[in-house]
Every structure is written in structure tokens, then in C-alpha cells.
Image (cartoon, rainbow, N blue to C red):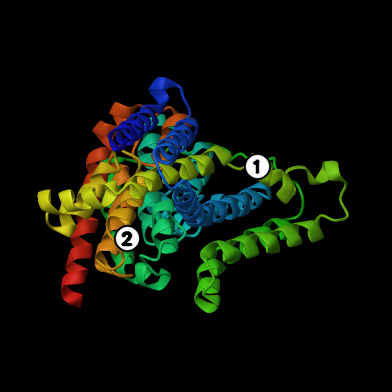
Amino acid sequence: MVTIIIVVFVLGYLAITLEHSLNINKSATALITAVLCWTLIISNASNKELITEQLSHHLSAISEIVFFLLGAMTIVEIIDAHDGFQNITESIKTTNKTKLIWLIAIITFFLSAVLDNLTSTIVMMSILSKLVEDKKTKWLLLGLVIISSNAGGAWSPIGDVTTTMLWIGGQISPLNIIKQTFLASFVSMVVPTLIINYLIKGKIELKAQVEQSLNFNNNSFERNLIFYVGIGCLLFVPIFKTITHLPPYMGMLLSLGIMWAITELIHQKKHDNEKGSLSVSHALRIIDTPSILFFFGILMSISALEAIGILPQMANALNKSVGDINLVAICIGLLSAVLDNVPLVAALQSMYSLNDFPQDHYFWELLAFTAGTGGSCLIIGSAAGVAVMGMEKIDFFWYLKKVSWIAFIGFIAGVSTFLLQHYFQQ
């Protein structure tokens, strides 16, 4: 039975990895894999009530991540519907090549820490499409956006789904992950920015006129109000958890409720047709639900392996073959460029207990950094890269030739910075 479950999981994982070749959405594959694994477990169990209790336990923990993502994605969608990100577009209008490159990198880096790396990449991709004329230059800048967004998400508890998983799982705390990984993440953004600034010769050719968004035609007060309140609500979530000790998803749902109330109040005198995409109800209908279902499916699949005791055995095997936990974390980071970092991190959370590595142990912090930034080494290695590849039609091998080596240098520079910082803190 154990062998069959492992085979089902491996086949499901391969199908997820080959999503674009098979033309089957990875969310569908993840859900099928999860249900099949748990069906095999309970069908071969003598005590079915115990298996149901285990399933409920895992469902409770995974639901925290699902509700957190649901709230965060809805708030971001509300800000975008009100054209709040137009503020960012207006802040990077410059003809100076070096200034433009650094603005793109730094804004993406900090934006992804507040939103998430996928959302910030989509925002910056939209901005660059309106600003930059030359396609190859734009592609190189989008490579920088992928690197910067993944680096920015790695040091924030709400910036990358894997870091959020580690926070909700109790492996890291918000203030400590910022303190321990910010410098390494910053270096992994700065080094590639320096390289790309050197590679782009001459002036960056900008479009004659920046297109204005057509989503929102009301006054700038409402646009700015929703932007700043939305960002404030996202930043409030770690503070709420620290004060109340409630799970992070409770703070996120409170923030969503606040945003919902504010949008209802400022648009209450408008006709329903006029509200259109400005309402939370509309945002809930168009958020990326398939991604949420993918996270749910893959995490339930991982929990099935944990339930049958496979993951602790894998941890022992990994310790024997690799030995050094630094190398384990670095290997996971590089593997995340080929495989999805969500199941990799979920597996390690189950493989290594908090008794072995307690909260804020540097292993968890290094894992958060490597899993967040290693995916930049290939365009298929992160949600940000896949989004750029799909929307801008960037060729896999073009990225491999032009950007992957830059991302790898940034990754190694960041890892070295993290290890040096840890060495001097001892």
C-alpha cells in the first residue's frame, strides 16, 4: 500500500511539473493526487476513524494557509481595481538608464515583501509593457523583476507562499525572519542589478506616451485611499498576530473585512453598474482560485505521505547522504528552480520537527531564503517566472542563456551573505 501511494504521489508530481506539456492544469492534478492518496490510506486502514481524525488535523492546518491566501489575494485585487498601482507607474518615469534599472529592482524588491512575488511581478510587468519599447531590453528587465520579486518575498512573512507556510507552521517568526534574511535577500537583488546595469548598453528606449489605466476613472483621493489602506492592512497582519497571538489568517481576514467595509462606504451612493469591478464581491469572483486549490491539493498530498511515515524516513536518508543542513537548504533552493518550492518546503516541514530545529533556528531561515530565491535560476522555477513566461512569451532557453547565470550568481552571493552573517552572530 505504501509503495502504491508513493507511486501515485510521484506520478502526480511529474504531471504537475509537466503541466504545460500535458495541457492539464496543475490544480486539477494536485486535487486528484491528494484524494487518491488519502483514499488509499483509509481503504487499507483497520481504524478508519483514526485516519479521519488525522485528515481533519491536516485539513485544519492547511486551511489556515488557504484562508490567508484568499484574503491577501482579494485585498491586492481591490487595490488593482482602483488603479492603486498607478502610483508606482508614476514614480518610475525617468529617461536615465541606471536610475530606471535601480528603481525597477528596488520597487519590485520592497513591493513583493508587502504583496507577494507573483502579484508584484504582474504589476511590474504591466508597468514595463507601458514604458519600454525594445523587446530584448524589456525581457532583460523582466528577468531582473523575477529575481528582485523572489528576493523581496523571501525576507517577508507575507512575501512568498513558502515563507508564509513556515510562519504559519511555527518554524519562523516575523521579526526574526526579517532581521536574519533581509541582508542576504538584498544582496541577491543588488548583485544581479549591477550585472544587468552593465549589460544594458546606451539609453533605454522608452515609449513616447505612457498609457493610462482605464479601470478607474474616479478621483485620485479614492484611488490613493484604497492603495494606502490596503498596503497598511497587509502590513498590519504580522502586528496583529504578535499582539493577539491568534493565527495569521485571522489578521488577514480582519484586514479583508476592513477593506470590504471601506469600499462599501465610499461607493455606497453609486449605482451597482457603476461600482462594477470596484467591489469586493467582484474581486472574490476573479482572484486566482486555481492557485489556491493547487496549494490545498499539494499540501494535502504531502500530508498523506506524512501520515504513512514516509517523510521522517526521507529526512533520515537526506541527513545521511548530504549530512550538512546548510547543504540541504541550498540543494532545496536549487531544486526549487526545477520543481515547485511549495511541496519541497512542505515536505521539509514534515521531515524536520520543531524538536530538532526549534522556531527561528537558522536552518528554517536559510530554507526560507533559498526556497524563495533559488527559483529565479530558471524561468519555470517560480510563480513569478511562469507568469512572465506565459504573458510575455519569453523563451525558456533565452532566459537560460541570458538570465539564469545572473540569478545563480545572486543566489550564491545571498547564501554566502547569510552564512557569514550567521557566523559573526555566533
* Closer to us: 222 or 347: 347
Specify the amino acid type for callout 1: Ser
Q: Quadrant of the N terminus?
A: top left
Label 2, on which residue?
186
Residue 11 showing in the rendered view: yes
Residue 190 showing in the rendered view: no
* Closer to us: 15 or 191: 15
Give residue 383's quadrant in the image.
top left
Closer to the camera: disc 2 or disc 1?
2
* Badge 2 element: helix
Residue 154, placed above or below residue 19: below
* Closer to us: 301 or 175: 301
Specify the amino acid type for callout 2: Phe
Badge 1 density bin: few <14, some 14–19, many ≥20, Cα 10 Å: few
User: Of callouts 2 and 1, which one flags the residue occurring earlier in the amino acid sequence?
Assistant: 2
| Residue in the image at 64% along x and 40% along y | 286
Badge 2 density bin: few <14, some 14–19, many ≥20, Cα 10 Å: many
- Name the residue at the top extreme: 22
Label 1, on which residue?
213
Residue 247, placed above or below residue 32: below
Residue 78, placed above or below residue 181: above
Q: In which quarter of the image is the C terminus?
A: bottom left
Residue 98's x, y, as percent? 36, 51
Q: Do the residues labelled 2 and 1 touch (CB within 8 Å)?
A: no
Relative to 424, is 72 on the left or the right? right
Residue 102's x, y, as percent? 38, 54
